[in-house]
Image: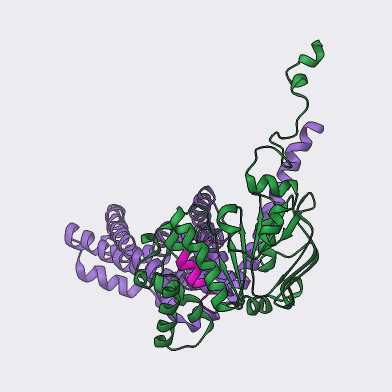
Chain colours: A green, B purple
Amino acid sequence: MSQPPIVEIDRVSFGYDATRRVLHDVTLRMPQGNVYAIMGQSGCGKTTLLRIIGGALRPTAGSARVLGAEIAALETHELYALRRKMGMLFQFGALFTDLSVYDNVAFPLREHTDLPAPVIRDLVLLKLEAVGLRGAANLRPSELSGGMARRVALARAIALDPKLIMYDEPFTALDPISLGVVARLIRRLNDSLGATSIVVTHDVAETLPFVDHVFFMADGRIVAEGPPGEVVRADVPFVTQFVQGNVDGAVPFHFPAPGYASDLGLGAKA
Amino acid sequence: MSGLRQPVQRLGHSVIERIVRLGFAARFFAYMILHSGTALRRFHLTIREIYFAGVLSLIIILVSGMFVGMVLALQGYETLQRYGSSEALGILVALSLVRELGPVVAGLLFASRAGSAITAEIGLMKATEQIAAMEMMAVDPIARVVAPRFWAGVISMPLLAVLFSAMGIFGGYLVGVQLIGVDEGAFWSQMQASVDVRNDILNGVIKSVVFGIAVTWIAVFEGYDAQPTAEGVSSATTRTVVTSSLAILALDFVLTALMFTGGNAG
């Protein structure tokens, strides 16, 4: 953890309006070169945190520094310049449906470079080879399975050799084989590119084995963090319940309600 | 008094919401115009959209134009022959089409065929996170996706209106001259003598350009502002057709008042 941090979040709070606060005083540091997981229940604020890191949302309070830049202070053109050093894999890939697999991967190269077509072709094939889909270059997104679409989106996300790669729920709706392939690709591409990766997910079994550091979030707060082995063994009730999938615990099974007996009118009779 | 308060509040809220949305649409328009460099510099992006908005609308425009012209000839002949001026059929068909029906009906058809498609496409791109993905790739979706579609609509609309009018005149010729038997020479020569390039044709083209701007602006804005759900995209598509149609009819009244009433009064 001695490398300079790629992401520094300091006491960040965020709310879509004054009454709905999603993040509360979140603080975290992500030194470069590692694969990080942000885990938690649906609605706990992990995707919101990822969107703040990507500059899609601005924190209501606190400081979010990414690749050395204060996100909230950036003008649009500065933010776009910063995003050229980032790659993002969306939940369902978000491939451009009117472009072929080849053109999808070539898209960021054509938009941001003046490289001649033969060089772009070589780069696209290189990226597709890295995700095992060079043979699918001429297919349309509608002809791909969910796992293949995710891998093409991954090839597109790394087209410009980003320093920071973000994954928003990359394992959603994947079969076990595709899930394993995507998980291994995240690790391998991160190491070969020398990048830093952030994986937002709630898939415990597939994620913990390949990440270096995990942040557990609940109700918009970081409740535990550390290397997966250590944090799972630590006696944090939420982490224990989340990792083991227990029905009741730190997150109660029952939504808060008045007493059952009084709701049934039994209290009055007693 | 308290019974009146809630409906008045709701009405006020609704009016404020509409004004805010109109303001947002105006800012969106200004941003789109200012960021049209990509659409004009990389013109192949706009040409591709001209194909989808313009070329694929050709069939409905040409067939409708033909039928409108044929109906005009039938109806016009019925009226003109009562006054012994059936030779003026060419003037009636041409002026009706060039001044009014060409731009207006082509505009309504364009809103239904191309406007709705533009809204649905951009709305679906938003719902499937393609717009967000583009932003994360540091590509401005308004410059890359919206502006080329806007300029394609603005370029296509007057061309479609001209083709609509041309087919309408041909339809009028088929019915008036070939079917009913109006004198061919009178049909064409009276049309040639009475239709003025500047006052009639140019004004019709100006109308169609204005309709093209209005329809395409509404279409791209509704798509970009759509709720990213199936229901949201469906509502946005409906709003595009309804709002565009009303805008065309309202603008047509204003433009007609500005263009033609002054000449008549004089």
Quadrant of the snapshot with the C terminus of chain A:
top right
Q: Main secondary structure of the magenta part?
A: helix
Q: Specify the farthest residue to the top.
A: A269
Residue drawn at 75 percent across, 56 percent down: A224
Q: Quadrant of residue A127?
A: bottom left
Looking at the image, is B19 positioned above or below residue A36? above
Q: Is residue B256 visible?
A: no
Q: Position of residue B51 (x, y in %)?
A: 37, 71
- Span of residues in magenta: A151-160
Q: Is residue A155 magenta?
A: yes
Q: Is residue A119 left or right of residue B60?
A: right
Q: Quadrant of residue A187?
A: bottom right
Q: Position of residue B161 (x, y in %)?
A: 39, 67
Q: Is residue B233 left or right of residue B22?
A: left
Q: Position of residue B47 (x, y in %)?
A: 41, 76
Residue drawn at 49 percent across, 80 percent down: A109
